[in-house]
Amino acid sequence: MNFQKNLLLSLLVLFLFSCSDGPEELEPLVVELTASTETPNYSESFELSWSSNASQCYASGGYWSGERPTTGSEEITLKRGGQFIYILECRRNNEFKNQAVEISVNKTPANHFIFSTDVDPLADPMFVVDVPDNQEAKVTAYARGDFNDDFLGDIFLALQFNEDGRHVNTRYFQLTGGAFPVFAEIEADNCKGSGDVTMLDINRDSFDDVIVTSFDSMTAAGNVCIFSGSETGLALNNELVANDTDLDFNNANVKLVTLVDRNADSLPDLYLLTSTGEYWVLVNAEDGPAFEKAETVVYLINDYTITGGTVVDFDGDANLDIVMAGYDESENGVFVAVPRFDSTNDWDDISVVANAPLAKIITGLDFDGDPAADLLVIGDQSPSNMFEPVPTTTFRIYEQGDINILDNETDILFSEQGSVSLNRNLFITDYDIDIDGGDFLFDVNKTASAFASFVLGIKDTIVNEEEETVTYEINTISDVEMELGDIFGQDSQLIFLDTDLDFDLDILVAENHADNNVAFYLRLNESND
C-alpha cells in the first residue's frame, strides 16, 4: 500500500513540474561607461556617464575609486598628463562585469611649470645672506638627496664669495623638504671647497651624505669636506670615512670626483682624483668606508685642467670607463678617457682626444633608448671659472654605438645659444613622467641680455611606421617661449627639486639684490594641484 502511495506522489510531482514554465530567466548583466571626451586638455573637465542593471558598482583607476550608484555621471578634472584608465565593475549575485574607458590628457610643457606668484622675495624671503662690500656671491655647486631620511627631496648648496675675481670664502646651506621646508646654514669650520659636490650614502645608514671638494683652478687650495646625514640633516663630519692614506683633506687639489662601481656589487663607490694620486672609497666595505690609494696615471692628467667628468662606456666594450673634460695650457679643449677593459679594477692607460669643446658639464644621458648611457656635453666659448658668465656655444650629445662614443655626435640648438651663459645647475629629470630618460633642465645666468631664466630640454621619439625606424631628438624651449612670464629676478639662480613630493618640480631661487645680500625663496609648482 505504501508503495502505491509513493508511486502516486512521484507521478503527481512529475506532472506538476511538466506543467510549469520553470524559473524566470534574468536579463543579461549590462555595464555601460562613456566619457564626454577621451582627449581632454590639461585642467579641462570631462564627464563620465554610466548605467547598469546590476545591484552594486565600484569605480577604480584614474583617481576614481569607491562604490558608485548603478546609474549616474561625474565631472572630472585632471592636471596630470598621460594615459588614465577608468574602470567600472558591477555585480549581480555571483555575476561580475566591467567596462573601461581610456582618457589621454594633453599636457604641454608650459602646463608642467605653473609656479606660485604669491611670494615677494624682497618682502618675505626664506633666508637672507649678507654679502660684504666689494664682494660677490654665487651658488657654485649643489647636490640633491634625502639627508634626514624622510623620503622628501633636500638640497645642499655651496655659496662662494669672490672679491676682485678671487675666491675668499664659502658658506654652506641646506633645504630640507616637506610641508614646511626649512632653510639653514651648516657650520663648516675652515672648509673651503666649492667646486664639486657629490651625494652618496657612504656608510649605508639610509641617510644621504655629501662630499665637497675643490675642483676649479681658482680654488686649488681648497680641501675635502664630508657632511654626514642624520635625522636633523647634514653636519660636517670628516671622521665619517677613515683616512690612512697620504690624502690631505686640508690641501687637496681635486681634479675629479665621480661615482664608479669599482667592485661590481651594483653599488656606486667614490672615485677621487687629485694632483698627487687616485683614491677610492668602497661604500659597502666590510670594515666600513675608508679611503685607499690606487695606482694612478695622474702625471699624465696633470698636463690638463679638468673641468668635469663622468662614467660612460667610452669605447663600446660594455665596460664603464672614466671620461673627463678639460683643456690644455693653450686653452684647447680635450677629453681624457681612462678605459676599463674588464669587470675588475683593471684600467688601461689614458687616452686624450684633442679638439674637444671647452666643457663645463659632462654627464650621462639616455638619448637613443638603448640600455647604454650616452654623453651630454655643454661648454663655453672660453674656459669657465663657474663664477663669471661665459657665453655657452656647445650643446652636444655623443651617442654610444659600436665605435668610440666621441665619433658619433649630435649638436643641439636653442634660441639663445652663444649669447647667454648656462650655469652648471643641470638637472636630468623625466619632467613629464613618460619614462623616456632623456629630459633635462638647466638655468641661465640671467643678465641684461638674457631674458630667460631656465631652458627645458625635451626628448622626443619619432616613429616612422612605413620605414620601421625609430629616431630621437632633443627640442629646447625656454620659460619665456612657454609664456610663463618673468617671475624671477634679474640676477637669480634656480635649483629644481620636488620639495613637497607632489611629482612636479619646484624651484629654489637664489637672488642677488642691489643692497648686498642674497635672498633664498621657493617658487612652488602648482601644475599638479
Image (cartoon, rainbow, N blue to C red):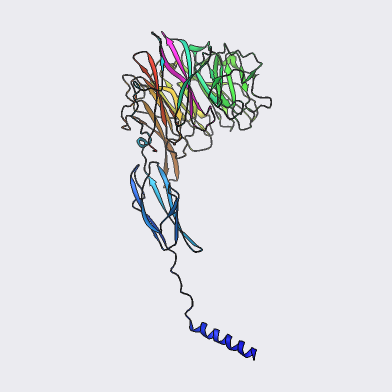
Range of the magenta residues? 136-164
Please provide percent x and percent y for residue 394.
Answer: 41, 24
In magenta segment, residue 144 = yes
Residue 380 placement: quadrant: top left
In magenta segment, residue 128 = no
Q: Nearer the viewer, residue 348 or 16?
A: 16
Main SS of the magenta part reads: strand
Q: Nearer the viewer, residue 296 or 469?
A: 296
- Kindly tell me whether residue 411 is visible in this rendering: no
Please provide percent x and percent y for residue 239.
Answer: 62, 18
Q: Quadrant of the N terminus?
A: bottom right
Please provide percent x and percent y for residue 421.
Answer: 38, 21
- Kindly tell me whether residue 370 is visible in this rendering: yes
Residue 442 placement: quadrant: top left
Q: Residue furthest right?
A: 287
How many marks do you count on the picture? Answer: 0
**Residue 510 higher or lower than 19, as above or below:** above
In the figure, is residue 391 to the left or right of 199? left
Q: Nearer the viewer, residue 33 or 186?
A: 186
**Residue 284 higher or lower than 86, as above or below:** above
Q: Quadrant of the C terminus?
A: top left
Please provide percent x and percent y for residue 191.
Answer: 53, 14
Give me the residue at 57% from left, 87% from top.
Answer: 11
Q: Nearer the viewer, residue 219 or 25?
A: 25
Give me the residue at 38% from left, 22% from top.
Answer: 125
